[in-house]
């Protein structure tokens, strides 16, 4: 809480600044800190540390921070380093985000698996004339250049791991690179957020449909970097100067350019923080994690965006939503709730329970607890980190030539006509569109002269981040798998990528068209597919051998064989260096010819959405067919689908192959999940928000199937269904009541508090009763089942009977 001063030289200056340091005990920040902590202001003792400047008289070339675990999620598999030119204070202040490097710990040697280059416009350096420091502009050539090289990143990572080993806990470290090219460790302190929290997580979720919110125009686009996975709402307060911070009140959402330590005392009781500047290790991000408040940083021009919205409409409240791992700002007070889950206490299961992942950074938080990922979607990496059609990168030089030719052609036409072409002329429109495309590609690929290498590197970094996020040794000795589905964009989705308009034509039904494996062997796309294979090979060379490529929409064994041969041509040889290959079982031919596919691959993952669509001939994107499908049971949990899945599992297991599922159905339908476990499926991959519930349901099913007779199994499932239905009935009103309590803050209605507590108690008791029922069943000396069933059934009936009375009470609060 005390001040720090840099570049102090000479005895007189040192003595002067020692006094200033001591005087800083009574700054507003330090005083308020002691007030909160309950320390006696006059019992505080202070010593001043005097350190030699890193780099000596020549000063610091670059500096930054590093964490022995991911600072945002606590994932222990990586070291995260941030670096900027000059002194690292600008990263802490949020003026600069800094370049980011993610290093994987568990390969045979340390490997850099992700590099993020940012534009660094400012740097803090020593003032040689007056002493102290000044902030100056970075030379234009250095703005888009990494400020440390790969070797320095690896040396820093080694230092980080040695420091962690020495202290025996996760560490937050500051470092500097001197102009003498030596690395200095200038500070190391224990990481306090995730190490104290342990495996207890609050899983936040909206009580309103995000699709409807987007359709109704409530989303502010491009809203920065999500810090953590919390949600928070409150009154909007745009504060552009610390001098106006006194205007902040409890529960407000602070929107400001950046924060620094002087803001800390004002942030304590906020609903959330949004800053225009900063990255995951800036002051706003660090303090938000410590205070458990929702936060978004690096939201470009957010102050002006919110001001513009305020000019157009009334805007009092705003919601920060980081629950999905992405940043979303809603321009209204969106209701939300959360569940507190102790992940370390979740029961272990024979059936592996995995998680579906998309955005790579999200894998560092969502990947900590599951048994791996059963579906890492390449399309998410392409959309999020590349944004460009691969053919536009392959043909980049040819497109530049095409643009030059078109320009020359236009000049000749204008010369003949002796006038400029009208700007809406189709020829002019095409030239402009091509120019815009090439300009955007150049911006997105800064730092890469070889555009193909950009695609390969960004894909590899995305895949590697996901694979590192889920990496762990499972109880059976296997490393948690990372099943990566190769690109499965439909034609209309490829059109939306930058340059897609050049390569993709319109299709009547893209769901059944030019997608999946049919693209990979086609002349129009094969070279793009080879880039994906190069990325996979690179990731595996980094030691992430848990990556399993999966082929989507593979229509026939013959097509599968061609893809396997293409993979071999790029050095990805199935069975060599533990490489496995899976196929998505999402077409009836995958089921019917399962034995033939098994000759070529190591396993299947059921894509239940497409398999249901193709089993019943129903286009799942056609809105008119949705109600018809519901009325006629064209569902995943239907007899036709059950028979198909059962046949696939038996055939595959008979030939020594694995089967998993990665569709939506097990996340939504506990009964279908039970069917899968009973059929002895090898793995179930769920969305992260349903992972804990899915793990518990899997555990319950395994015990019931192992312990009970057929008659008693039916009764046990009937009881658990009753518990699940009751939980689902309670969840929404409970969430809305808890939401109202949060809004009332200090002036809480005693009646509202009482009703909310009663809903909370019912919620907990239902979960506890179901859990204790299974625990009793699993004892070596099994109790009398009928007595156990009747006892627990009556407990649930009592809780159920409370609901009608509670329903009347909550209507008084405007709920339902």
Image (cartoon, rainbow, N blue to C red):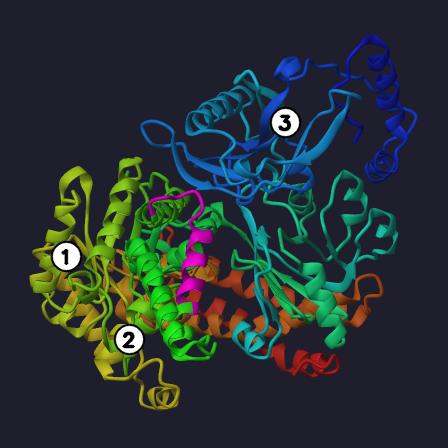
> Badge 1 local density, few (<14 within 10 Å), some, or many (20+)?
some
Q: Read off the residue under disc 3.
A: 189
Residue 665 in sight: no
Q: Read off the residue under disc 1.
A: 563
Q: CA distance from mark 3 to mark 2?
A: 56 Å
Q: Nearer the viewer, mark 3 or mark 2?
A: 2
> Badge 2 local density, few (<14 within 10 Å), some, or many (20+)?
few
The stretch of residues the image draws in magenta is 432-450
Q: Mark 1 and 2 residues: CB-CB less than 8 Å, in contact?
A: no
Q: Read off the residue under disc 2.
A: 505
Q: Residue at x 81, y 17 (%)?
A: 47
- Vertical placement of residue 597 versus 474, above or below: below
> Badge 3 local density, few (<14 within 10 Å), some, or many (20+)?
some
Q: How far across and how far down the image is residue 186, in percent?
A: 63, 21
Between 295 and 681, which is closer to the camera in this rendering? 295
Q: How far across and how far down the image is residue 754, in percent?
A: 75, 68
Q: Residue at x 53, y 45 (%)?
A: 73
Could you say which quadrant of the image residue 735 lies in? bottom right
Could you say which quadrant of the image residue 333 lies in? bottom right
Left/right placement of residue 81 relative to residue 580 reads: right
Left/right placement of residue 800 relative to residue 777 reads: right
Please check the rendered image and state whether residue 198 is part of the magenta-colored stretch, yes or no. Answer: no
- Residue furthest to the top: 11
Pointer 3 or 2: first along the chain: 3
> SS for tag 2?
loop
Please check the rendered image and state whether residue 446 is part of the magenta-colored stretch, yes or no. Answer: yes
Between 701 and 466, which is closer to the camera in this rendering? 466
Dominant secondary-structure state across the stretch colored magenta: helix
Which quarter of the rendered picture does the N terminus lie within? top right
Q: How far across and how far down the image is residue 401, in percent?
A: 31, 58
Q: Mark 3 and 2 residues: CB-CB less than 8 Å, in contact?
A: no
Could you say which quadrant of the image residue 679 lies in? bottom left
């Amino acid at each position: 809480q005390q001040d720090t001063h840099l570049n102090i030289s000479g005895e007189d200056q040192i003595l002067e600044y020692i006094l200033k340091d001591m005087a800083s005990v009574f700054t507003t920040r330090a005083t308020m800190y002691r007030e909160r902590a309950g320390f006696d202001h006059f019992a505080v003792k202070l010593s001043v540390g005097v350190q030699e400047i890193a780099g000596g008289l020549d000063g610091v070339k670059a500096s930054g921070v590093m964490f022995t675990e991911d600072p945002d999620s606590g994932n222990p598999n990586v070291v995260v380093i941030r670096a900027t030119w000059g002194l690292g204070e600008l990263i802490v202040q949020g003026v600069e985000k800094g370049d980011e490097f993610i290093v994987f710990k568990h390969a045979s040697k340390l490997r850099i698996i992700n590099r993020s280059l940012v534009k660094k416009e400012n740097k803090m350096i020593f003032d040689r004339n007056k002493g102290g420091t000044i902030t100056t502009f970075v030379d234009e050539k250095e703005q888009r250049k990494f400020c440390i090289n790969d070797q320095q990143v690896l040396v820093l990572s080694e230092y980080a791991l040695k420091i962690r080993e020495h202290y025996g806990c996760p560490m937050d470290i500051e470092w500097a690179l001197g102009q003498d090219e030596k690395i200095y460790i200038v500070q190391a302190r224990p990481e306090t957020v995730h190490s104290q929290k342990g495996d207890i997580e609050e899983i936040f979720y909206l009580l309103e449909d995000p699709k409807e919110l987007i359709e109704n125009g409530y989303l502010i686009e491009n809203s920065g970097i999500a810090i953590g996975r919390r949600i928070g709402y409150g009154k909007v307060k745009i504060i552009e100067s610390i001098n106006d911070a006194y205007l902040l009140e409890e529960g407000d959402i602070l929107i400001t350019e950046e924060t620094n330590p002087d803001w800390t005392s004002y942030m304590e009781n906020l609903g959330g923080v949004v800053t225009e500047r900063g990255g995951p290790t800036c002051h706003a991000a660090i303090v938000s994690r410590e205070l458990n408040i929702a936060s978004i940083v690096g939201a470009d021009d957010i102050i002006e965006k919110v001001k513009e919205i305020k000019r157009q409409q009334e805007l009092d409240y705003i919601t920060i939503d980081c629950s999905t791992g992405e940043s979303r700002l809603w321009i209204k007070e969106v209701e939300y709730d959360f569940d507190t889950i102790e992940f370390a206490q979740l029961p272990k299961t024979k059936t592996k329970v995995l998680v579906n992942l998309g955005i790579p950074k999200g894998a560092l938080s969502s990947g900590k607890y599951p048994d791996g990922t059963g579906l890492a979607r390449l399309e998410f990496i392409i959309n999020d980190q590349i944004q460009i059609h691969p053919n536009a990168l392959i043909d980049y030089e040819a497109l530049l030539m095409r643009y030059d030719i078109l320009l020359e052609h236009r000049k000749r036409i204008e010369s003949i006509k002796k006038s400029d072409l009208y700007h809406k002329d189709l020829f002019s429109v095409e030239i402009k569109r091509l120019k815009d495309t090439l300009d955007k590609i150049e911006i997105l690929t800064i730092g890469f002269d070889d555009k193909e290498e950009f695609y390969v590197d960004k894909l590899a970094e995305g895949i590697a981040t996901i694979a590192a996020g889920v990496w762990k040794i499972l109880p059976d000795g296997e490393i948690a798998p990372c099943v990566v589905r190769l690109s499965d964009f439909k034609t209309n989705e490829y059109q939306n990528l930058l340059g897609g308009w050049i390569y993709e034509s319109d299709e009547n039904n893209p769901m059944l068209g030019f997608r999946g494996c049919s693209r990979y062997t086609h002349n129009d796309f094969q070279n793009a597919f080879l880039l994906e294979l190069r990325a996979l090979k690179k990731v595996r060379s980094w030691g992430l051998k848990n990556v399993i490529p999966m082929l989507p929409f593979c229509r026939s064994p013959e097509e599968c064989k061609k893809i396997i041969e293409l993979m071999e041509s790029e050095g990805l040889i199935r069975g060599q260096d533990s490489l496995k290959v899976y196929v998505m079982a999402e077409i009836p031919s995958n089921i019917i010819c399962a034995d033939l596919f098994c000759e070529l691959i190591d396993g299947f993952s059921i894509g239940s959405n497409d398999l249901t669509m193709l089993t019943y001939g129903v286009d799942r994107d056609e809105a008119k067919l949705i109600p018809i499908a519901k009325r006629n049971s064209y569902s995943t949990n239907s007899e036709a689908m059950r028979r198909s899945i059962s046949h696939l599992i038996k055939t595959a297991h008979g030939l020594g192959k694995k089967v998993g599922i990665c569709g939506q159905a097990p996340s939504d339908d506990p009964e279908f999940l039970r069917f899968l476990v009973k059929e002895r499926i090898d793995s179930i991959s769920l969305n992260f928000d349903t992972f804990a519930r899915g793990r518990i349901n899997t555990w319950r099913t395994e015990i019931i199937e192992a312990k009970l007779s057929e008659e008693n199994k039916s009764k046990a499932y009937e009881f658990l269904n009753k518990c699940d239905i009751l939980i689902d009935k309670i969840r929404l009103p409970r969430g809305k009541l808890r939401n109202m309590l949060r809004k009332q803050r200090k002036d809480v209605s005693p009646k509202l508090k009482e009703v909310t507590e009663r809903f909370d108690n019912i919620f907990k008791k239902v979960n506890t009763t179901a859990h204790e029922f299974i625990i009793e069943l699993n004892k070596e000396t099994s109790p009398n089942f009928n007595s156990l069933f009747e006892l627990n059934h009556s407990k649930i009936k009592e809780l159920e009977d409370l609901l009608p009375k509670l329903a009347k009470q909550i209507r008084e609060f405007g709920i339902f």
